[in-house]
Amino acid sequence: MKRSMVTQKCKQSAKGKTFIYFWDVYSAVTGQTAYDHLHDETGRQAKWITNKDFIDWVDEKILHKGWSPDAVVVTLSVMNYSVKSRFHARKRSITGSIWGSS
């Protein structure tokens, strides 16, 4: 059965007997829901989701230091550029223990 198909059931009674029929019909809503679910599952999962040190660092900055989420994103962008050697600053001097030392 295809993702956009649903099974319908019809129950009829005639001459004291009950008949049950099943058939598959197209449903645009079901098809769209299946597409949306599969689309959400595509792509690679971000590394930060499984990095406990990173999550702890973000929690510390937002919950205890009063940083806004935007400030965390900007800081991470600067760190990312540094890690990719786009700046002349040494990776270890900016990133600290979040990304590990190298």
Image (tube, rainbow, N blue to C red):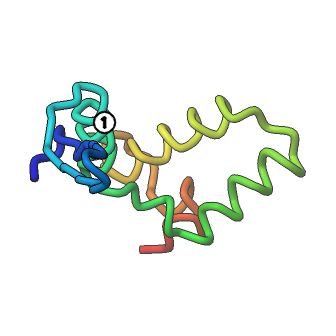
Q: Secondary structure at mark 1?
A: helix
Residue under the image location 23 percent in, 25 percent down: 28
Q: Amino acid at mark 1?
A: Asp
Q: Nearer the viewer, residue 15 or 72?
A: 15
Q: Label 1: which residue?
A: 36
User: Which of the image's four quarters has the C terminus?
Assistant: bottom left
How crowded pointer 1 is (Cα within 10 Å; few <14, some 14-19, many 20+) is rated as few
Left or right: 47 as drawn, with respect to 96? left
Residue 71 vs 3, above or below: the answer is above
Left or right: 79 as drawn, with respect to 1? right
Q: Residue furthest front?
A: 15
Q: Nearer the viewer, residue 33 or 45?
A: 33
Residue under the image location 22 percent in, 46 percent down: 7
Q: Residue furthest left?
A: 1
Q: How many marks?
A: 1
Residue 90 x/y as whole percent: 45, 56
Residue under the image location 59 percent in, 39 percent down: 75
Residue under the image location 85 percent in, 49 percent down: 63
Q: Residue furthest top?
A: 28
Residue 26 x/y as whole percent: 15, 32
Residue 90 vs 72, above or below: the answer is below
Q: Nearer the viewer, residue 61 or 89?
A: 61
